[in-house]
Image (cartoon, rainbow, N blue to C red):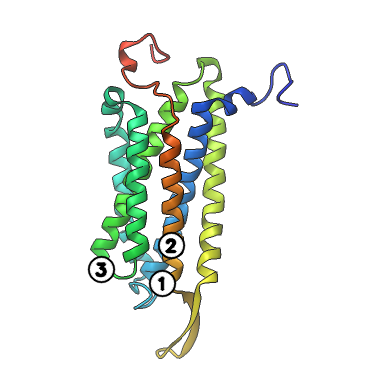
């Protein structure tokens, strides 16, 4: 067993210690939320009015581009202040922003225009990427150099796990709260998610991030002032 092996593939001590354990849980939830929100966004953009915005596949992809752009900019920009302020602060800030953004989506996802909807999804993405970056830094600086590769590899495993079951749960929720509509041109019927599906989907994700915000309070700060210490980066 890995617990008793002399040279285990994944030392249990790495996964069970406080910061790595919380970081892995947080990364898993972040991946879950990103994939679930992406799938929900795809449906909302493409479903016919009043259940969505009635956009094409190409338009949907273009409207979802701001989320990726925000992530590309926020991730590197958060690095320098994170060293001064601390990664724990950004973990709390990110999960709180994602929580508020998801609550707004649960309430207004199908009741606002495209600019407002994109603004709310960008808000959620900003919070998730802040939390993601902070947790990765907390993980790296909480383990010894010789096991850093194992720790980050295990973290990727948790991220992939969250990304895998996120769309599955989103699909289940949207299938549960669905309705049959009749389209006049061309004449056909189709089953699409009701507004209730998005409310349940985004609200449940919001409370997951509320739990993660509370969980982040238990993190031990190891990144603040790292440049001035005899740390792993030296």
At horizontal 32% and vertical 26% (from top left) the residue drawn is 86
The numbered mark, 1 or 2, whose residue comes first in the sequence reads: 2
Q: Is residue 185 above or below residue 201?
A: below
Write down the quadrant of residue 187 in the picture: bottom left
Q: Which mark is residue 195?
A: 1
- Residue 14 in percent (x, y) is at 58, 24
Give the distance between the C-alpha atoms of the residues marked 3 and 2, in whole angstroms. Answer: 16 Å
For label 2, the crowd category at 10 Å Cα-Cα, with few meaning under 14, some 14 to 19 and many 20 or more, is many
Name the quadrant of the N terminus: top right
The numbered mark, 3 or 2, whose residue comes first in the sequence reads: 2
Q: Is residue 108 above or below residue 77?
A: below
According to the image, label 3 marks what residue?
113
Write down the quadrant of residue 105 in the picture: bottom left
Q: Secondary structure at mark 1?
A: helix
Name the quadrant of the C terminus: top left
**Nearest-to-viewer mark from 1 and 2:** 1
Q: Which mark is residue 40?
A: 2
196 left or right of 66? right
At horizontal 52% and vertical 41% (from top left) the residue drawn is 159
At horizontal 38% and vertical 75% (from top left) the residue drawn is 51
């Amino acid at each position: 067993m890995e617990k008793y092996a002399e040279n285990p593939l994944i030392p249990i001590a790495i996964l069970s210690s406080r910061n790595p354990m919380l970081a892995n849980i947080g990364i898993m939830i972040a991946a879950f939320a990103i994939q679930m929100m992406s799938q929900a966004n795809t449906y909302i953009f493409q479903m016919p009015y009043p259940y969505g915005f009635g956009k094409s596949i190409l338009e949907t992809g273009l409207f979802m581009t701001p989320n990726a752009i925000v992530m590309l900019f926020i991730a590197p920009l958060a690095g320098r202040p994170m060293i001064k302020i601390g990664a724990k602060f950004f973990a709390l800030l990110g999960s709180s922003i994602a929580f508020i953004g998801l609550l707004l989506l649960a309430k207004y996802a199908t009741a606002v225009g495209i600019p407002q909807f994109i603004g709310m999804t960008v808000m959620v993405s900003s919070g998730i990427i802040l939390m993601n970056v902070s947790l990765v830094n907390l993980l790296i600086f909480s383990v010894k150099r010789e096991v850093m590769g194992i720790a980050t590899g295990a973290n990727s495993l948790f991220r992939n796990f969250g990304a895998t079951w996120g769309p599955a749960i989103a699909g289940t929720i949207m299938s549960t709260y669905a309705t049959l509509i009749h389209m006049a041109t061309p004449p056909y019927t189709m089953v699409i998610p009701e507004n209730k599906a998005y409310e349940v989907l985004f609200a449940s994700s919001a409370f997951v991030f509320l739990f993660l915000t509370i969980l982040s309070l238990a993190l031990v700060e190891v990144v603040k002032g790292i440049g001035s210490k005899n740390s792993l980066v030296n």
